[in-house]
Image: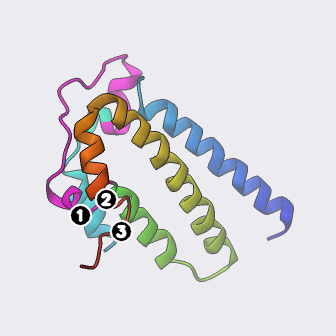
Amino acid sequence: MSLVDHLLYAVAWGMFGLSHSLLAGAEARRGVGLSALRAYRLGPFVGWSQLRGEEDAVQTLVVTGLHRKVRHPLCTAALLLLWGRVDDELSLATAIWGSLYLAVGSHFEERRLMSRYGESYRRYRAITPRFFPRLL
């Protein structure tokens, strides 16, 4: 890939990230991702509720299941998929830009969660790693 190709690919990831962020907040691989999905309500998770202008006031802070080990288990699954599939220049670029998107996106998600859940989220954040569980 040329430098221009990488820049265009970065712009595409940026547009995806921006559109996801606008829809996401109104104010070891496959198994990890599927398991993590059980903790979320479908409408708010995919953005349908936000498109209809509905807030997800009933969703409580989830700290059970995979969320006991990491704060963002879906990002963990995505990172495993992205990096586990690297076998050429395009998949490497995808892993790099996708990882950057997940890191930046999780930062903004954390700000939203801090605002929403306050001290409960601060305590949870202090003891639970962002993407990868502690080995001990």
Q: Which residue is mark 2?
A: 73
Q: Which residue is mark 1?
A: 69
Q: Where residue 132 is drawn, which disc sits there?
A: 3
Q: Are marks 1 and 2 in contact (CB under 8 Å)?
A: yes
Q: Residue furthest bottom?
A: 87
In the rendered image, residue 5, in percent from the top left (x then y), is placed at 80, 61
Badge 1 element: loop
30 relative position to 65: left or right:
right
Q: Residue at x 32, y 25 (%)?
A: 49
* Picture quarter with the C terminus: bottom left
47 relative position to 124: left or right:
right
- Alpha carbons under labels 1 and 2: distance apart: 8 Å
Residue 111 quadrant: top left
Q: Residue at x 65, y 81 (%)?
A: 88
**Residue 32 included in the magenta stretch of the image:** no
Task: Name the N-terminal-most of marks 2 and 3.
Answer: 2
- Magenta stretch bounds: 45-71
Q: Amino acid at mark 2?
A: Pro
Badge 2 element: helix
Q: Which sits in the foreground, 50 or 135? A: 135
23 relative position to 128: left or right:
right
Q: Residue at x 51, y 55 (%)?
A: 103
Q: Amino acid at mark 1?
A: Lys
Residue 99 quadrant: bottom right
- Alpha carbons under labels 3 and 1: distance apart: 8 Å
31 relative position to 9: left or right:
left
